[in-house]
Amino acid sequence: MSRNPDRPLSPHLMHWKWGPHMLVSILHRMAGVGLAVVGGLLLAWWLLSAASGEAAYESFLDWFTVDSGAINIIGVIFCVGLTWAFFQHLFNGLRHFVLDMGAGYELKTNRRWALIVVWGAILATAGLWVWLLWPALVNISAGEF
Amino acid sequence: MGTGTGLGRVRGLGSAKQGAHHWWQQRLTAAGNVLLVSWFVLSLLRLPDLSYSVVTDWLSSPLVAIAMILLSANVFWHLRLGLQVVIEDYIENEATKLAVILLINFYAAGGAAVAIFSIAKIAFGGAA
């Protein structure tokens, strides 16, 4: 049972050479913790304020919008962050379902799907927010902001 | 008893035989989340805006309220399991670990209760 204390216990971020499979693994946890804490609190707060009447709901919205009702910078940071975390955790979660079936462990296949997950989440987030903010972006470029 | 790990041989007990239950629950709620959270995100995107009247109208529809209650239960159960694994992997001090696990359980149960009660109140109360 003697163990060399210089060796890491498990795949450790400080000891192992980085690759897409490690990146996607730690991103899954980071996105998951972000969704669990920020997303969970936001969901409960949103529903509670909607159940507490119009004034309470307005004060919830005030945190994330400007006076005109458009989304403010805090709203954009929270929503874009949660959108990315959602896509990252969803896509990698689906990847894990495939791994759970015992498939996709070959080095090249594993590497390819890890990269697809990371880039897919970034592209999906960017695509969604360009689509959502398109009217505002057009207004800015037309000088009507 | 002679074929397990060294620690298991010393204790003569082996594993607690409950690892697969946690793992399986995590997968079940993950599959539920794929459906429920994707539906939720698409629904939010399809609403004309997120004003009080639009949101409460939407939540008071029976099918929406039922799906949102399922989502709340599923999301908070899934995040309870997930946060527990992260805590167990990174917190070495047993007392701290116990305290944080307790906190996670309170958070998950509390969050689910707040969400489900709020949906029910809106759905049963009728939109204002």
Image (cartoon, rainbow, N blue to C red):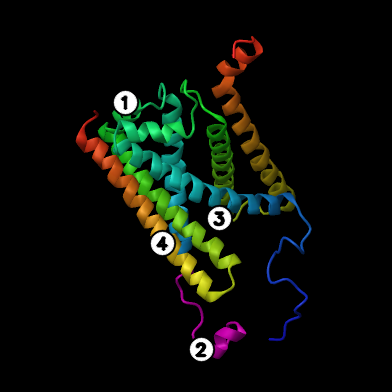
Q: Quadrant of residue A80?
A: top right
Which residue is label 1 attached to?
Answer: B53
Rounded to the nearest angstrom, the CA distance separating label 2 from label 4 is: 31 Å
Rounded to the nearest angstrom, the CA distance separating label 2 from label 1 is: 63 Å
Q: Is residue A144 left or right of residue B123?
A: right
Q: Amino acid at mark 2?
A: Gly
Of marks 3 and 1, the one in the foreground: 1
Q: Output the chain of dot 1.
A: B
Q: CB under 8 Å between callouts 2 and 1?
A: no
Rounded to the nearest angstrom, the CA distance separating label 4 from label 3 is: 27 Å
Which numbered disc covers residue A100?
3
Q: For the residue labelled by badge 4, is the local secondary structure a helix, a strand or a loop?
A: helix
Q: Quadrant of residue A102?
A: bottom right
Q: Quadrant of residue A54?
A: top left
Residue A24 seen from this side: yes
Q: For the residue labelled by badge 1, is the local secondary structure a helix, a strand or a loop?
A: helix
Residue B116 percent location from the top left of the image: 31, 46
Residue B53 percent location from the top left of the image: 32, 25
